[in-house]
Image (spheres, rainbow, N blue to C red):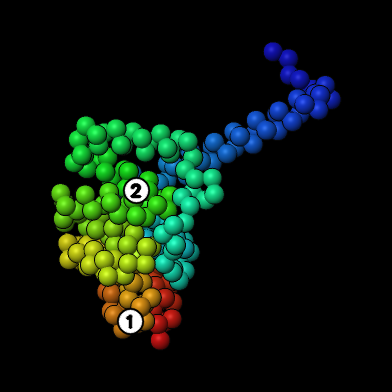
């Protein structure tokens, strides 16, 4: 099939091609983002922790000082959840209608709410999971972090400590519990948990970032 030459395009044709290219790029970008979202929990030992504000889950490229978020923040920005994510949410809801104790569906739905900033809804799902699996350390950690985002420091502390009790090497829980204490002005407590991370963190760059965070407590 013969290609259309640029000079043969009408103004409307050019606009359609430009719009089509933009939509295609947006779709590819969203697909890549979705694929990087956690859908199952894995052990956090040996990797840098999930930071409650400046970092996405499991990413440690830009350790920054996190602060609690507004629990009423619109999920995914002003536009809300993308349609494809909404379809996945509905898929999990349908599975839960058949089996309210479906751990995979509860986890997936909770993660969707967490990643889109709907922390109260994430909390509801995570609570159902820990009722069934109280020693699920990663869910306890994300549950505690979700409470942190809603400014509920008491419950954040409770569940992050439960995560650490179940797995003393859970870096996400150790770091995030330090954040909870730091934001309450309890610097000694924050330092205690961050110091526990030192022998667990791998890589010079990661260790330096942790040391920098600890030094800011002085």
Residue at 33% x, 33% y is: 91
Residue 50, percent across and down? Answer: 37, 60
Tell me the tag on residue 30.
none
- Within-10-Å neighbours for mark 1: few <14, some 14–19, many 20+: some
Residue highlighted by disc 2 = 111
Residue 180, percent across and down? Answer: 33, 72
Sequence order check, earlier mark of 1 and 2: 2
63 or 142, nearer to the observer: 142
- Image quarter where the C terminus lies is bottom left
Q: Report the residue that reaches farthest toward the front.
A: 72
Residue 106, percent across and down? Answer: 26, 43
- Within-10-Å neighbours for mark 2: few <14, some 14–19, many 20+: many
Q: Report the residue that reaches farthest toward the bottom.
A: 218
Q: How many marks?
A: 2
Residue at 16% x, 56% y is: 135
Residue at 27% x, 70% y is: 154
Task: Check disc 1 and report its element: helix, strand or loop.
Answer: loop
Q: Report how far apart the C-alphas of labels 1 and 2 lie in the structure.
A: 29 Å
Task: Check disc 2 and report its element: helix, strand or loop.
Answer: helix
Determine the image quadrant of residue 172: bottom left
Determine the image quadrant of residue 47: bottom left
Q: Are marks 1 and 2 in contact (CB under 8 Å)?
A: no
Residue highlighted by disc 1 = 186
Q: Residue 137, can we see it? A: yes
Q: Is residue 21 above or below residue 217?
A: above
Residue at 39% x, 72% y is: 210
- Image quarter where the N terminus lies is top right
């Amino acid at each position: 099939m013969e290609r259309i030459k640029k000079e043969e395009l009408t103004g409307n044709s050019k606009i359609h091609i430009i719009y089509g290219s933009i939509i295609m790029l947006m779709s590819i970008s969203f697909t890549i983002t979705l694929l990087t979202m956690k859908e199952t929990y894995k052990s956090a030992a040996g990797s840098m922790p999930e930071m409650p504000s400046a970092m996405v889950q499991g990413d440690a490229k830009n350790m920054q000082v996190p602060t609690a978020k507004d629990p009423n923040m619109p999920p995914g920005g002003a536009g809300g959840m993308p349609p494809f994510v909404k379809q996945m949410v509905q898929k999990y809801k349908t599975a839960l209608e058949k089996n309210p104790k479906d751990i995979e569906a509860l986890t997936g739905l909770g993660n969707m709410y967490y990643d889109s900033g709907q922390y109260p809804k994430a909390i509801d799902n995570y609570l159902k999971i820990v009722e069934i699996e109280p020693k699920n350390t990663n869910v306890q950690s994300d549950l505690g972090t979700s409470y942190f985002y809603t400014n509920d420091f008491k419950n954040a502390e409770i569940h992050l400590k439960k995560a650490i009790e179940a797995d003393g090497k859970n870096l996400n829980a150790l770091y995030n519990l330090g954040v909870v204490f730091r934001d309450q002005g309890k610097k000694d407590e924050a330092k205690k948990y961050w110091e526990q991370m030192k022998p667990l963190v791998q890589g010079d760059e990661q260790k330096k970032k942790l040391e920098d965070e600890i030094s800011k407590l002085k």
